[in-house]
Image: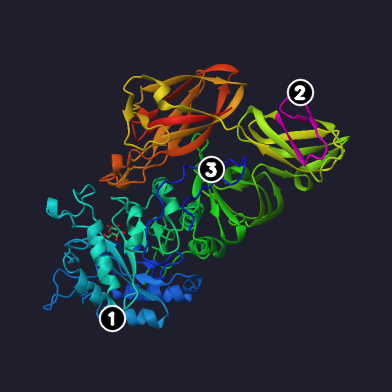
């Protein structure tokens, strides 16, 4: 089980990414269930808390008729609204007989006869969510209810968190309870395990106590956040919440991004593709939340095409079970890149177009740790390309996503002569050389096909300058390394002359960069330095907080050449959108970086917290996240760098994330 998603493999391979978590995977329930994310259908997103038997039967039948069952969508869950206010005389739970005249056991039987699975819904409080009409909850009746669910032959339980906070007299929701929901979920988990029927357990406490840290020991999935809402902005909000916990996904333990809105008529087809693609590659359970078929509705062809895309489903159900993670985000330009490994050495990558206009977007393979792909399959673009070197460009619809599978790949920084080289007079020139940053300090290693026979000179030049770089190679050397400049981008050329021995490949190693801790910056306005608990706010131990719109942190930073530099920003954001999830909460904050008085580059950072915002160390405000941006306007010599929150007063969040420090790749 990999504990770090974004391992940096090998020399010079720089994968820009959000810092890997320092939390190893927790012990998990190891009962063989949910080895890949569960898939199914649930009443809630379309029918709200008004399910009934006809709805369940017709949609279940439609799962079969439309072939969705054979693609994996098998669990049919009846969400809120199914029950009644009172328990039976013997204290057991029962269904609403008006809504479900044949009763739950019969409905379970009906689903099983269709070779589907029966999902039930309960609550860890005194009532189910969506009450009134009052539906009794499972608090203090866990054992009896688990037994009842098993008797009904349920296959899974979605367990919710409404009316659960005793300290505040059981309100519908309390997003800031004084005690953790965890013990209540643990009691139900144990009660389920005591039954002689395996039942998948879905923890649904809306991410209020960072369940990634404890839910894997109790169940098979956990909701990472508050409910999805029928609005496009819910996608960005959800992804921002997923960012710090992608590394917690694994067989038997899945971060649940919530049920799908595909087919509910709220998104364009491109938006549905984005929603479905990202849920799939982040290994969320895939639960259809649309009306497939009932008396008045049938799912549209377009939405069905999205839900039945077998490539996307295969990414979700990939046996490796590793989630994609966020690699790069260009906030000003409105796009971002996610990727992750698949079984058999393949990689999946997604480029999301946040702008609502169709345009060409480019995936630079080094952003996902690769240099070339023997085969690239563009899933929504329905294209296939062979021999892809460094970059792939395609038209992406407004709010759409370029979703590609890369196979037969080589690692970033490695340029074989066979793929990238071309004979050029007395030498060899290598094309499509990628540079993360503009720097004179790239290491360029030339690997010879065989050891050189006698001492000789070698000369190279890059497209970044007119200068040539030479060195002597001793006899029998296999390789030689020179230092040379490259310009940020994917179109550099390296030409090597006068080599008698054939070159096998060229390896390009970017500079390591220099770290500037926030503690060394000079603060203006309301910005304040905050010391963190031992071992937190990595790698500095402190951070700059309270970066309001008029507040800044300044530093003078030396660079050894002019141009655009890649800067990795270490930030902290644990402003979790709970109440605000119903409105405009985005789980993001705005950070800007300006060099020498130029236009600031904006980065809308996602959450970084990997501990509970209620009870964790520093309330999760000590966990560093990291994302890189390309910043222009650097000079050879001293540079004025300003970290701030330009325009923050106009955004949803008036404060920037806390700033820990930055690494400049020069
Ligand atoms: C919420 C839950 C939703 C849905 C709803 C029913 O708490 O997160 O997924 O079950 O309750 O009212």
To which residue does mark 1 refer?
105
> Residue placed at 18% from the left, 70% from the top?
84
To which residue does mark 2 refer?
467
Mark 1 and ligand 1: say if the CB distance to the nearest ligand atom is below 8 Å: no
| Label at residue 383 | none
Q: Is residue 191 above or below residue 656?
A: below
Q: Are marks 2 and 1 in contact (CB under 8 Å)?
A: no
- Residue 66 percent coordinates (x, y): 48, 73
Q: Is residue 55 above or below residue 468?
A: below
Who comes first in sequence, dot 1 or dot 3? Answer: 1
* Secondary structure at numbered mark 2: loop
State which region is magenta.
460-483
To which residue does mark 3 refer?
357
Q: Residues within 10 Å of mark 2 (few under 14, many from 20)?
A: few
**Quadrant placement of the C terminus:** top right
Who comes first in sequence, dot 2 or dot 3? Answer: 3
Which of the pair 12/290 is nearer the observer?
A: 12
Colour mode?
Answer: rainbow
């Amino acid at each position: 089980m990999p504990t770090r998603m974004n391992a940096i493999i090998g020399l010079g391979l720089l994968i820009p990414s959000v810092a890997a978590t320092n939390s190893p995977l927790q012990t998990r329930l190891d009962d063989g269930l949910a080895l890949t994310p569960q898939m199914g259908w649930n009443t809630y997103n379309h029918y709200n808390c008004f399910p009934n038997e006809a709805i369940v039967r017709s949609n279940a039948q439609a799962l079969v008729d439309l072939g969705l069952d054979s693609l994996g969508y098998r669990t049919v869950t009846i969400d809120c609204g199914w029950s009644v206010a009172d328990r039976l005389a013997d204290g057991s739970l029962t269904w609403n007989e008006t809504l479900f005249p044949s009763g739950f056991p019969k409905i379970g039987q009906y689903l099983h006869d269709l070779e589907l699975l029966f999902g039930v819904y309960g609550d860890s409080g005194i009532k189910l969510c969506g009450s009134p009409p009052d539906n009794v909850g499972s608090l203090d009746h866990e054992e009896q209810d688990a037994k009842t669910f098993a008797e009904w032959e349920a296959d899974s339980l979605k367990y919710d968190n409404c009316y659960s906070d005793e300290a505040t007299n059981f309100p519908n929701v309390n997003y800031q309870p004084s005690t953790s929901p965890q013990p209540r979920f643990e009691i139900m988990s144990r009660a389920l395990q005591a039954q002689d029927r395996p039942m998948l357990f879905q923890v649904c406490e809306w991410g209020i106590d960072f369940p990634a840290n404890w839910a894997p020991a109790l169940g098979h999935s956990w909701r990472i956040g508050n409910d999805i809402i029928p609005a496009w902005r819910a996608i960005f909000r959800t992804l921002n919440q997923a960012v710090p916990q992608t590394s917690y996904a694994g067989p038997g333990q899945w971060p649940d991004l919530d049920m799908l809105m595909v087919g509910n008529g709220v998104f364009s087809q491109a938006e549905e593709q984005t929603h479905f693609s990202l849920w799939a590659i982040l290994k969320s359970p895939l639960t259809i939340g649309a009306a497939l078929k009932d008396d008045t509705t049938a799912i549209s062809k377009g939405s069905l095409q999205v839900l039945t895309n077998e490539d996307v489903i295969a990414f979700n159900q990939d046996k490796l079970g590793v989630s994609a993670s966020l690699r790069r985000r260009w906030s000003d330009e409105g796009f971002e890149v996610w990727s992750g490994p698949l079984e058999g050495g393949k990689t999946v990558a997604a480029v999301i177009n946040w702008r609502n206009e169709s345009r060409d977007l480019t995936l630079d393979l080094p952003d996902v740790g690769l240099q070339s792909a023997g085969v690239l399959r563009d899933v929504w673009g329905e294209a296939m390309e062979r021999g892809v070197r460094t970059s792939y460009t395609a038209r992406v619809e407004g709010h759409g996503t370029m979703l590609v599978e890369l196979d037969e790949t080589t690692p970033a920084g490695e340029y074989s002569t066979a793929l990238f080289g071309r004979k050029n007079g007395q030498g060899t020139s290598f094309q499509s050389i990628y540079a993360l940053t503009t720097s004179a300090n790239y290491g360029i290693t030339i690997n010879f096909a065989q050891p050189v026979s006698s001492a000789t000179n070698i000369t190279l030049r890059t497209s970044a300058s007119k200068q040539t770089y030479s060195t002597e190679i001793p006899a029998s050397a296999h390789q030689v390394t020179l230092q040379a400049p490259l310009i940020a981008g994917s179109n550099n050329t390296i030409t090597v002359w006068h080599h008698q021995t054939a070159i096998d490949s060229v390896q390009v190693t970017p500079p390591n960069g220099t770290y500037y801790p926030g503690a060394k910056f000079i603060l203006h306005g309301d910005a304040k330095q905050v010391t963190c608990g031992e071992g937190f706010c990595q790698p500095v131990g402190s951070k700059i907080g309270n970066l309001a719109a008029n507040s800044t942190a300044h530093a003078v930073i030396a660079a050894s050449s002019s141009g655009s530099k890649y800067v990795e920003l270490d930030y902290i954001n644990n402003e979790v959108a709970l109440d605000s999830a119903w409105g405009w909460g985005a789980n993001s904050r705005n950070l800007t970086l300006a060099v020498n008085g130029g236009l600031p580059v904006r980065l809308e950072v996602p959450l970084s917290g990997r501990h509970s915002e209620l009870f964790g160390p520093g309330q999760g405000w000590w966990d560093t996240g990291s994302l890189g941006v390309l910043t222009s306007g650097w000079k050879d010599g001293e540079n004025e760098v300003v970290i701030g929150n330009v325009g923050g007063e106009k955004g949803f969040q008036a404060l920037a994330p806390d700033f820990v420090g930055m690494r400049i790749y020069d």
